[in-house]
Amino acid sequence: MREFLKRGKQLWKLLTEIIKIMGAEIKGIEYVLPANKVNNEDLAKKFPEYDFAKFEDKVGIKNRYWVDEGQTALDLAFDACQKLLNKYNKEDIDYLIYCTQSPEYFLPTTACILQDKLGLNKNIGSFDYNLGCSGYVYGVSLAKALIESGQCSNVLLVTSETYSKYIHPEDKSNLAIFGDGATATLISNSDTEKIGSFMFGTDGGGAEKLIIKNGAGKNKFNSCSPQLTYGSDNIYTDNHLYMNGPEIFNFTAENIPNFTDEVLKKNNILKEDPDFYVFHQANSFMLEFLRKRIKVDKEKFYINLEDSGNTVSNTIPIALKRLSGSFTDNSDKKVVIVGFGVGLSWAGGLITINKNI
């Protein structure tokens, strides 16, 4: 019996050591944008009184892409996944996580429908989660936890949004800012730790700063909802997306710089150690403000939203894919990712990527 217990302890110690070195890594990222390209000249025809040249210079957005009437976030998600799975074996996928605020239905979860459309195995986990601009960072952390706990080996993380369906046709500010899109990321087990530690933040007291009030459980969709205005004569109703831009900026400015410092401390690295910083691509004015406040060198702080706009949970993976395309060698690059926005919600962590994702 003593020998049996001794061997049991030795086995448990060995398993514990194996778990300690088990890690996760981002193997691949792909994204798709709808075919319907809308540039600032197109919007200027609709809103001739608005200076879109000034908007482009300040906000940094030239083009955004919107789905057609019959196209949904699920359609975009399917295309992004197909693009990724052309490079990887779909039989290896054993978990599907789908981040969206543009679900196909109230129920069932869209992830289940996507699993079927993709022809993935039936013995896998699948679920949706409703998060916006912090959603991708949450998803990477969730995938890491699932893998490192031994519950699965290959997670398909999907983000997809069609905010264009929620914006009032006379809301020039939000029409100019938001674009639609979808991304698919394969996160797999690794013998080295290529995804670091994460931190999170939540302030539900700011929920009404970015909200669609009607259409869910609290308030039914109301076809007679009165028109309201905000900002510079932007029109919306409670059936549509409302965003208090100045308050969202203030929330970001007050929280994200110190939070980024905490993320660095959590990962035991100095500010100069990461190769790049990729934040939620909200707009270039906000990003430049954050870069200066955090005191990061310009060449390390990636900004790329001219050709896509703010695609909500998609902005970070799209930026990571575009960034990786600029790498001139195959070496690993450490990247700090930080998402923030609707919720109010924010999240940050450290990942490693290379030219091959």
Image: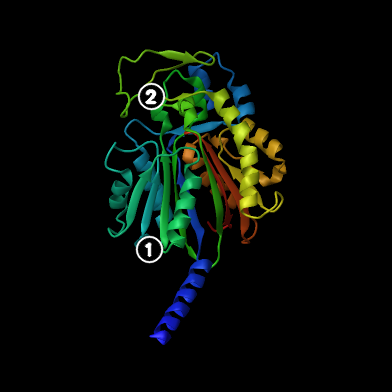
Please give the name of the residue rendered at 53% of the width and 16% of the height, measured from the top-left corner: 231
Q: Where's residue 187, x and y in %? A: 46, 57
- Return the x and y of residue 20 as percentages of the image width and height: 52, 67
Its colouring scheme is rainbow
Q: Where 288 falls versus 319 (above or below)?
A: above
Rendered image: mark on residue 82: none
Q: Give the quadrant of the N terminus.
A: bottom left
Q: Which residue is mark 2?
A: 213
| Residue where numbered disc 1 is placed | 92
* Secondary structure of residue under mark 1: helix
Disc 1 and disc 2: Cα gap in Å? 40 Å
Asked whether residue 87 appears in the rendered view, the answer is: no
Q: Nearer the viewer, residue 210 or 110?
A: 210
| Residue drawn 43% across the image and 44% down it | 159
Three-letter amino acid code at the position of disc 1? Asp
- Res. 195 visible in picture: yes
